[in-house]
Image (spheres, rainbow, N blue to C red):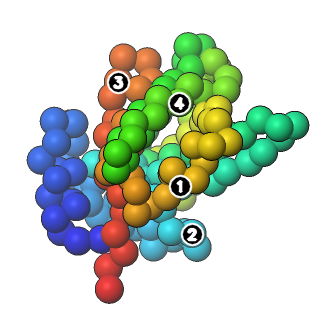
Amino acid sequence: MTMGVFGKLINSKQKGDDTSNEDYIKTVISSSENEPLALSNNSIMYVGYNELGGYYYLQTFIVGRLKVKTKNGATLDIEGNNYNLKLNSDMPELESEPAHPLEGYVTKIDFQIEKNDVEKIKRSNIKTLTLFVKKETHVFLIYKKEE
C-alpha cells in the first residue's frame, strides 16, 4: 500500500479524522492473516467466491468503521478494465456485527454473480469497487501491499 492510495482515500469526500482512519486501517490489516482486496477511507474489504447449487456468489467481508442495518440489501458496482458489473446482494437483510478488539464492525455481504463474470474479478483487472447501502456510497480502491 502506498501513500498514494491513502492520499486518494483521504482526499475523498467521506467524513472522518484522516490520521486516525489511516492508523486504524493499518492496524486492521496487520491483525489479519489474509490480504485485503480493497480499502475505503475507513474500512477494509476482503473477498472470496462460493458456488452453491449452480449459483455463484462473491462473498465480501468488510472490516472497519462501516456500520449497517438494513432490510433493503446492497449493490456493489465494480469498475474494471473494459467492463462494469453491478451486483445485487443475495439477501435484503444486512447487519454489521461488532469486531472486538478492533473497535469497529464486520459486515458480511454476499453478492450474486454470473459464472462467466467470476473470472473478470481479479485484483489486476479492477479499478474501483463502490458499495451502495442505505443512502450511503462507499468507494474502495485496490489494496497494494507495501514492499
Q: Is residue 36 above or below residue 74?
A: below
Q: Can you identify the residue that label 4 sits on?
A: 87
Amino acid type, callout 1 = Tyr
Task: Report x, y in % for residue 17.
Answer: 19, 48
Cα separation between marks 2 and 4: 23 Å
In which quarter of the view is residue 20 placed? Answer: bottom left
In which quarter of the view is residue 79 placed? Answer: top left
Cα separation between marks 1 and 3: 19 Å
Cα separation between marks 2 and 3: 27 Å
Cα separation between marks 1 and 2: 8 Å
Nearer to me, 136 or 129: 129
Marking on residue 34 = 2
User: Which numbered disc flags the more N-terminal residue, 1 or 3?
Assistant: 1
In this picture, residue 6 sits left or right of residue 83: left
Tell whether label 2 touches label 1 (CB within 8 Å): yes
Amino acid type, callout 4 = Leu
Q: Can you identify the residue that label 3 sits on?
A: 136
Cα separation between marks 3 and 4: 16 Å
Cα separation between marks 4 and 1: 16 Å
Secondary structure of the residue carrying tag 4 is strand
Residue density around tag 2, few if under 14, some if 14–19, many if 20 or more, within 10 Å: few
Amino acid type, callout 2 = Asn
Q: Can you identify the residue that label 1 sits on?
A: 46
Q: Give the mark toward the camera: 2 or 4.
A: 4
Q: Give the mark toward the camera: 3 or 4.
A: 4
Task: Report x, y in % for residue 126.
Answer: 39, 52
Give the residue at x 63% y 54%: 48
